[in-house]
Amino acid sequence: MRGIACQMLLLSTISTTAVAFQPSYSVPRGLSPLSLLTKTQSQVGRKSTIPPYHEEKKKHGSWSLIQLSDSSLDGGVSDESDAPAKKGFYGRLSSVVPPANERQKLIPLGLMFFCILFNYTILRDTKDVLMVTAPKSGAEVIPFIKTYLNLPVAIGFTGVYAKMTDRMELKNVFYACVIPFLFFFAAFAGFIYPNRLFLHPHALVDTLAAALPANFAAPLAIIRNWSFALFYVMAEMWGSVVASLLFWGLANEITTVDEAKKYYPLFGLGANVALIFSGQYVKFVSNMRANLAPGVDAWAMSLNYLMGAVVASGGVLLGAYKYIQDKIVAKNEAMANMKAPPKKKKTKMTLKESAKFLLSSSYIRNLALLVISYGMCINIVEVSWKAKLKQAFPDPNSYSAFMGNFSSATGMVTFVMMLLGRTIFEKFGWRTAALVTPTMIGVTGLGFFATNVFSGAMAPVAAALGTSSLMLAVILGAAQNILSKSSKYSLFDPCKEMAYIPLDKESKTKGKAAIDVIGNPLGKSGGALIQQILIFGVGSLAAATPYLAVILSILVATWFRAANSLAGQFNDAMAQDGGTPAPAPA
């Protein structure tokens, strides 16, 4: 295991690869694309593919739901009208420390974000361990879960969330979403997993398996281990609902544009710290089995510690949220009621009307296509890698320990990539930054598939490195995932969130809910459906590898086309707002 830890640490230090492109447009002297994006205040013309601004946007400006990475890349560049910076070391130091009124909201927000991502990393690693190492299961079940469980749940939640926001106060929506998650994870470790032999219908599934063709093994494994599949879905939904939707809705509600420009970068760096800490905690808990007495269920004990940490972190999350509601939101609402004019009646739209409204914009469609393409591409490569991972680490605790190292390495590489991302945005612009992630996934994904297809030719290379062909494939697959996820977190997510800036409030709120909650599961489900067809057709994931490589190439090409189209629309929209980059030279 120490060898694996060393390999992962070495992997994290050599995986920081920068991809260079030609500039997509020129920037006026003294301004960066990111600093220009934060000044969007004028109305987009009717001929644009983007829905027009509301009058409120003209008054207050706009700011997308997740500006963390956008602002982190902007680096807090101040406007020309800002006062000159203080001179000297102490002056610079005092300018970095937020004033008391800003610390009151930024510290609890940062604590909330840390807790959310700490939990998400633990849940993400645990869900894979449960399903991949479950009895008569494997990585082949993941495509079926994403298609027939994740996607329907995501669509259903979107409808429920829309009704909740119409009928409940926003603070109660947060509680109503987060608390059931925490209850489920506590119940899973305390009751469901210890009674899994009673709850799981092994005898019934064995009877069905004897009567059905072998190709039905993956769907039957989901039925056999239904509680593990339910945990998988809940873990996926935590990331989509709590991190993407609820937290950033709160952050943008209480944070001004100027504060976001200065302090959202710290959230981005803190997110990667949470990734590193949670990854090491998973590894620590998984390695505790060495001190257990014979006959003790090591994985059950690990699960208790992991879910205990999730519930404890969730309690801190709720406490920080309550503090913000009591100390910040209540005061802001009181001031707004004194100054604000009478509110216009809110126009309510059904889920079907909202979907029709959003799909009528080619801008929204391109944005959704970016998210769906990412989900399909990463799923196609990731599932094949996890199949290799199970072969190398069949024991749940060993698998979990490896995933802990993997998460920590992802956090460290993403930290470095976020620093490089600022340079990419400032020197090359939105278009180039948006193309880095598909390039990274395409190159590394095809390299991983080539390693599997030509495994015989790679055997001498593995022997020269002092490892096996299987472990070499695992390490290369981990490198692919680390680079893909780090470029996604540092560049793809900022590009996506910047693209929301020109949208009106209705399109931004409902568009983001639809794209974040449905788009990503839809992409993963699409990749999963492709894998299901190939598994039924050729018999296994290993046999389907050459076909997956071809499909990955087609998806990356489609992703490139959508990104280039959206870049043109985005630049046109920003040009109508004034002070934006000039078009790229022919």
Image: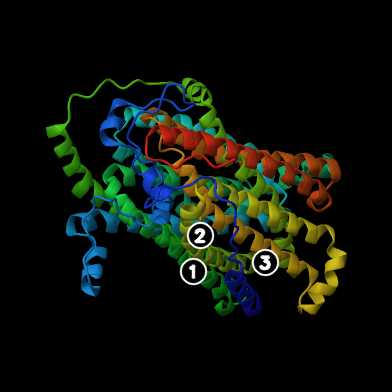
Task: Name the colouring of the figure.
Answer: rainbow
Give the residue at x 43% y 35%.
Answer: 575
Q: Distance between the residues labelled 3 and 1?
A: 18 Å
Residue lying farthest to the right in this orientation: 456
Which image quadrant: the C terminus? Answer: top right
Say whether disc 1 or disc 2 marks the residue closer to the N-terminus.
Answer: 2
> Quadrant location of residue 290?
bottom right
Residue 436 pos. (x, y %): 59, 52
Give the residue at x 77% y 49%.
Answer: 549
The residue carrying mark 1 is: 281
Residue 129 pos. (x, y %): 62, 59
Q: Give the number of the mark in front: 3 or 2.
A: 2
The residue carrying mark 3 is: 395
For badge 1, the amino acid type reads Tyr
In this rendering, position of residue 320 left or right of residue 200: left
Badge 2 marks a residue whose secondary structure is helix
Give the residue at x 60% y 37%.
Answer: 562
Relative vertical location of residue 398 with respect to residue 438 in this rendering, above or below:
below
88 or 579: nearer the viewer: 579
Label 2 Cα crowd, 10 Å radius (few <14 / some 14-19 / many 20+): many
Residue 178 pos. (x, y %): 39, 46
Badge 1 marks a residue whose secondary structure is helix
Say whether disc 3 or disc 2 marks the residue closer to the N-terminus.
Answer: 2
The residue carrying mark 2 is: 122
Which image quadrant: the N terminus? Answer: bottom right
Q: How far apart are marks 1 and 2 (CA)?
A: 8 Å
Q: Do the residues labelled 1 and 2 touch (CB within 8 Å)?
A: yes
